[in-house]
Image (cartoon, rainbow, N blue to C red):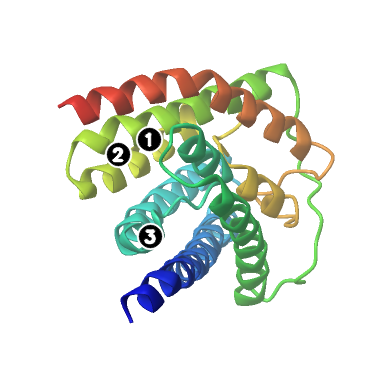
């Protein structure tokens, strides 16, 4: 009997891990979807109500996004880590915080959830569901901005790990709200968000042609950040 239990243990463990992964991936899908509903939906509402005042529209968009981030991280953090961002997932793998075989499922769910979130936002505001953005976002300054925004976001997340969980939610939201304004690109800092926002010809959009440049810049910011993230993680563990 003991030998039979021992033989079945790997199967039981594998089943438990698969169930845990499926659950986490589902929550990443839902959380990222809601994030894009907030980003795109608030952008549409802000543009409609701002009377052509772009600064006011951006402020409303930033505040709505920040508020949604607090709620989503608090709600989904315990379920999946609330990455909602392939850059965060890849950083977690590179710093030993997530198994590499989980990463592809996480990233797929994030991209799919983000796209669905954009489509739902379009439906809520009675717009055509399927769109491509014509909003030009390109150039060296914006690429540098995306690298800086992604680097800063990752440092904020890893830097808050020494504190209690709610701190991260408020810190990330505060950072993104501020980065809407202090970066030339309005701080996408997220490949899934970038892909999804290329599918909306609204205030939050980015031309599909410009999206790869943003994503490459985000990955550059991630790679530069990784040594610092590892050092921060090591220090947090030693404390």
With 186 as the anchor, is 182 left or right in this view?
left
Image point 68% across, 76% down: which residue?
126
Q: Position of residue 215 (x, y in %)?
A: 69, 35
Question: Counting other residues with Cα less than 10 Å from the Cα at mark 3, is it few (<14), some (14-19), or many (20 or more)?
Answer: some
Q: Residue furthest right?
A: 209
Q: Pick the residue in front: 142 or 153.
A: 153
Gap between marks 1 and 2 measured at Cα: 6 Å
Q: Tell me if mark 2 has few (under 14), some (14-19) or many (20+) residues whose alpha carbon lies within 10 angstroms of its own.
A: some
Q: Residue furthest bottom?
A: 1
Q: Which residue is tagged 2?
A: 171
Q: Are marks 1 and 2 in contact (CB under 8 Å)?
A: yes
Q: Secondary structure at mark 2?
A: helix
Q: Which mark is residue 175?
A: 1
Marked residue nearer the N-terminal end (3 or 2):
3
Query: Tag 1 or tag 3, which sits nearer the N-term?
Result: 3
Q: Which residue is mark 3?
A: 72
| Residue 129, image x, y percentages | 75, 71
Residue 46 in the image: x percent, y percent?
Answer: 53, 55
Q: Identify which residue is drawn at 65% across, 68% down.
A: 116
Res. 196 image quadrant: bottom right
Q: Which quadrant of the view contains residue 17?
A: bottom left
The quadrant of the rendering that contains the N terminus is: bottom left
């Amino acid at each position: 009997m003991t030998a039979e239990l021992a033989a079945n243990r790997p199967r039981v463990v594998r089943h438990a891990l698969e169930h845990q992964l499926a659950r986490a991936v589902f929550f990443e899908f839902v959380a990222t979807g809601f994030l894009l509903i907030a980003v795109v939906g608030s952008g549409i509402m802000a543009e409609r109500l701002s009377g052509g005042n772009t600064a006011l529209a951006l402020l409303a968009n930033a505040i709505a996004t920040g508020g949604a981030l607090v709620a989503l991280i608090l709600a989904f953090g315990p379920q999946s880590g609330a990455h909602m961002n392939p850059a965060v997932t890849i950083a977690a793998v590179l710093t030993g915080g997530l198994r590499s075989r989980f990463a592809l499922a996480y990233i797929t769910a994030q991209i799919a959830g983000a796209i669905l979130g954009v489509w739902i936002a379009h439906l809520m505001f009675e717009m055509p569901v399927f769109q491509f953005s014509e909003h030009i976002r390109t150039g060296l300054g914006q690429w540098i901005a995306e690298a800086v925004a992604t680097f800063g976001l990752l440092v904020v997340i890893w830097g808050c790990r020494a504190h209690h969980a709610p701190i991260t939610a408020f810190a990330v939201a505060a950072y993104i709200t501020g980065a809407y304004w202090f970066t030339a690109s309005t701080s996408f800092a997220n490949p899934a968000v970038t892909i999804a926002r290329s599918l909306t010809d609204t205030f939050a959009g980015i031309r599909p042609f410009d999206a790869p440049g943003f994503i490459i810049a985000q990955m550059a910011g991630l790679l530069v950040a990784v040594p610092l993230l590892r050092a921060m993680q090591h220090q947090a563990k030693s404390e």
